[in-house]
Image (cartoon, coloured by chain):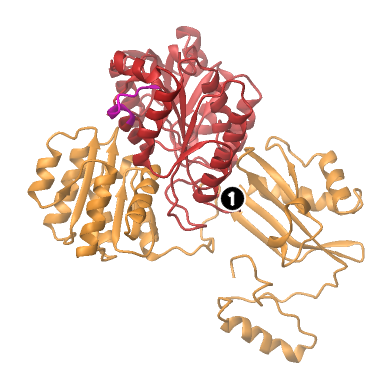
Chain colours: A orange, B red
Amino acid sequence: MLEGGRGKRGGILVVNAQADLAAAVERLLVGSDLLPKAATVLVEQFVVASRELYVALSVDRDLGTPVLLVSALGGINVEDVPEEDLHRFPLSILDAEVPLVVIEAIATELTLNADGPLGGVLQAMWTCFCKSECLLVEINPLIVSNGELVAADAKMVIDDDARRRPTGIDDGRDKTSFEVACAAAGVTATELSGDVAIITSGAGLAMATLDAVVRLGGRACCVVDMGYSTLQSQSTLQEVAELVYGLAPRAILINAFLQMASCRTLAAAMEAAVRHGSWRMPVVARLTGNDAEGVEALLSSIGVVVAEGTEAACVDAVRLAAAG
Amino acid sequence: MGLFTDELRRVLIQGITGGAGRNFAENMRLSGTNLVAGVRPGRGGDIVEGVPVFNTVREAVAETGATASMIAVPPNSVALAAQEAADGGIKLAVIYSEGVPIHESLRLRALWRSGNSRLIGPNSAGILSPGVANLSDMRSVPMRRGSVGVVSKSGTLTYEIVADLDKERLGVSTVVCLGGDPVLGTTAEEIVPLFAADMQTEVVVLVGEPGGQAEVRAAERWRSLERQVPLVALIVGQAVPQGRRLGHAGAVAGSLGESAREKMEALAELGVQVVDDLSSLPHAVASLLASGSAASKRDADRGSYD
């Protein structure tokens, strides 16, 4: 199960006799309402814990540095740990090792011996974080057992854009088949539940358009953010048009403010989608910016509702979806 | 005078021979930006858009005195290009490229902050100061010089805002697009004080989105400043479900306080004027300017498209 909260959701079982093992494994393979069924089950020795600690390396996006997060209150309820019990130690990405002063401070915080195994654990985590270009390396719980430290469970998140990202790793984040197909076509898409398909020329505009549609009482079935290279490619635009059609929206809303890309290229792709039957539902378009001359007339001639401005386009799309 | 005016006087483009690089070069020529050079290893001696291409930033700076760089190279080359810009004496660099690994952004941020140069981006649409320079991909946006400072993560949304302000006859001092990535060379917290210190800027528009706390930190910083320029904020992504990412790599609310709604509340508590949606922004800016000073009248009177 590639997500957090395993212990809380009954995904970690303790058995005291070999005879009970098969039943326990069976339960995990079947799953429950709370717990997705497991594909594989890891069996490990039970460790008697005198204390459960939390240690993680993450990226502090506001500081723009890596940060070590530690808490003496680790375990399955770590999400509920109050902010003052979660201690943050910013690190420099340029450091080859975790500095000794940081290890000492953490040892004090966790009431551990700074000369003990803690330093080795932190250095190993740092190496892993840097080498695998991670966004998160988390050990929870880090168990104190007879003076030893045992990493009882761990979680890693590797950057999607990491240069050496290993292939074939399932990142465990659920993506819909629509999102996967869009990603393969080179566009960023989010599937939601609703009946207006939103296609925009950028992420910020996508969010503002979704906000307006929802504020006006509409619901979006997807938001597709097309980048410059997508906007220049007729074949990609055609592919995206068909993928969007597959979601059976009641209205399609295209909101594009183009700088480098051309409104005419986008309009031509829209014309093809309408003419080839990829889009049989009402289409609302707001195309402005670079190379926009004559676009309005072309789109109007094929039955596309042309709107001026984001707000007006959203009003039209919500109205048409409700009527459709 | 707007932000980064000195740095923006002499501009070069790294990756000038590529598709995006050529577009920037043409854009700069059309907008009257003083493009002095291009850089592309192995293509030294070429001419693009009338400016010489150099093999290295160092050579380009030595020959032309360039102080700002637009970095438009493939994501895998960004780290080297940005390092070269820093080593070559560039004072202000914008990374346009999208898809830069976060660990490289962390390294670049650490590197650039140790010097006295400024890095914007990655995944930034750039900087525009009408009448000074256009170091951005903006081309079809009305470039009216005025007194509104805009700081945003997004490109597309910013075009929309600048165009909407123009319809109200409001111009901009400087537009800074910080980039859509989670780790950035420069954050809004660092830009807001620069706007407050800039005498051309009479009101600042802060555009935010889910994820991180950058907008709240910027507002906290703003409150502590001596010159209190009015701050108007728009946070988009209010309808994005928690934990979902929409478009920008950085736009995902993971922790408490990172959603658009939570940020809007936090900003309002700090005394920032928060608008609910894009369409209310121009009017909010116009009324602040009208109540604050004669700056809006000044923009309208000037009315020029520099």
Which residue reaches farthest front?
B291
Image position, residue B94 (x, y; %): 47, 27
The residue under the point 59% across, 65% down is A3
Estimate how packed mark 1 is, as few (under 14), some (14 to 19) or many (20 or more) residues with alpha carbons within 10 Å. some
Picture quarter containing residue B215? top right
The residue under the point 51% across, 47% down is A161
Picture quarter containing residue A154? bottom right
Q: Which residue matches tag 1? A: B257
From the viewer's perspective, is B236 left or right of B300? right
Numbered range of the magenta stretch: B165-172
Q: Nearer the viewer, residue B57 or B227?
A: B227
Look at the picture and state if B66 lies above or below B26. Answer: above
Image position, residue A61 (x, y; %): 60, 42
The residue under the point 49% across, 47% down is B251
Q: Nearer the viewer, residue B226 or A93?
A: B226
Label 1 element class: loop
Task: Indicate the chain on which mark 1 is placed.
Answer: B
Image position, residue B88 (x, y; %): 55, 17
Q: Is residue A91 magenta?
A: no
The C terminus of chain A, quarter of image:
bottom left
Identified by mark 1, the residue type is Gly
